[in-house]
Image (spheres, rainbow, N blue to C red):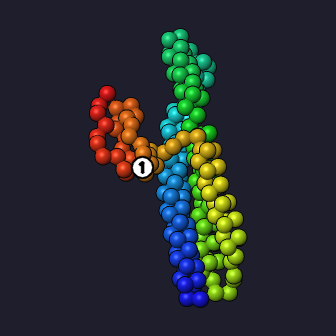
């Protein structure tokens, strides 16, 4: 009887450790995607506000008698900023990062609910329910990672196997041993 209780305790401890590991990963991901969403929104605003001013200036220049060159310059600047805004799609990418962060927050809540149910003396959680919930958590994590369009810089350092160079900046994972040689 005592051996069964010890085995069950070991399995529960292993499950708690596994859930804790998932929770840490989800919290890091949620925070990184939240930060990433803010960065992308700020970039969007840095393009949009000057674009609004230049677009307004285009109308003013057209209504007054100003040199033709001024209208051409302002119109060209407006076209360039519009093209950059559409190409970079910061607003859409920011929204995707925000939704990804929300998905990770949902997974964290599910993990915390399972942990609470396991700790509860009132509620009995069957092994089948634990397995089902853990499978759902793993599936939701995989789905969230697949649906994320961008990987934030803040997350790259937590990827253990990464050993790359992005532009001219070396990126090392936590398990990497050597430096990336410059290109």
Tell me: residue 179, above or below residue 130. Answer: above
Question: For the point 55% across and 67% down, which residue is it?
Answer: 19
Which residue is at the front of the view, 159 or 18?
18
State left or right for residue 112 relative to residue 166.
right
* Image quadrant containing the C terminus: top left
Do we see residue 173 in this rendering? Answer: yes
Q: Residue furthest bottom?
A: 1
Dividing the picture into quadrants, the one containing residue 95 is top right
Residue 147: % across, % down = 63, 44
**In the picture, residue 170 is in which quadrant?**
top left
Task: Quickly name the residue at label 1.
Answer: 160
Q: From the viewer's perspective, is residue 56 above or below residue 34?
A: above
For mark 1, give the secondary structure: loop
Seen at 53% across and 50% down, the residue is 33
Which residue lies at the image location 59% right of the left edge and 48% below the top edge? 145
Q: Quadrant of the N terminus?
A: bottom right
Residue 54 pos. (x, y %): 54, 27
Q: 132 or 75, which lies in front?
A: 132
Disc 1: CA contacts within 10 A as few (<14), some (14-19) or many (>=20) = few
Using the image, determine if residue 4 lies above or below residue 151.
Answer: below
Asked if one can make out residue 56 in the rendered structure from this viewpoint, the answer is no
């Amino acid at each position: 009887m005592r051996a069964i209780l010890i085995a069950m305790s070991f399995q529960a401890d292993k499950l708690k450790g596994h859930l804790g590991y998932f929770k840490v990963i989800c919290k890091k991901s949620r925070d990184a995607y939240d930060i990433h969403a803010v960065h992308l929104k700020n970039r969007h605003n840095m393009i949009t506000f000057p674009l609004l001013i230049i677009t307004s200036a285009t109308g003013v220049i057209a209504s007054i008698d100003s040199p033709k060159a001024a209208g051409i310059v302002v119109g060209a600047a407006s076209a360039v900023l519009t093209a950059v805004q559409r190409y970079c799609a910061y607003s859409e990418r920011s929204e995707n990062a925000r939704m990804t962060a929300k998905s990770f927050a949902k997974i964290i809540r599910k993990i915390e609910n399972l942990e609470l149910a396991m700790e509860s003396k009132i509620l009995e959680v069957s092994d089948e329910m634990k397995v089902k919930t853990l499978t759902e958590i793993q599936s939701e994590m995989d789905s969230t990672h697949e649906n994320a369009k961008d990987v934030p810089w803040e997350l790259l350092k937590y990827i253990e196997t990464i050993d790359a160079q992005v532009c001219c900046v070396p990126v090392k994972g936590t398990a990497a041993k050597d430096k990336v040689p410059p290109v």
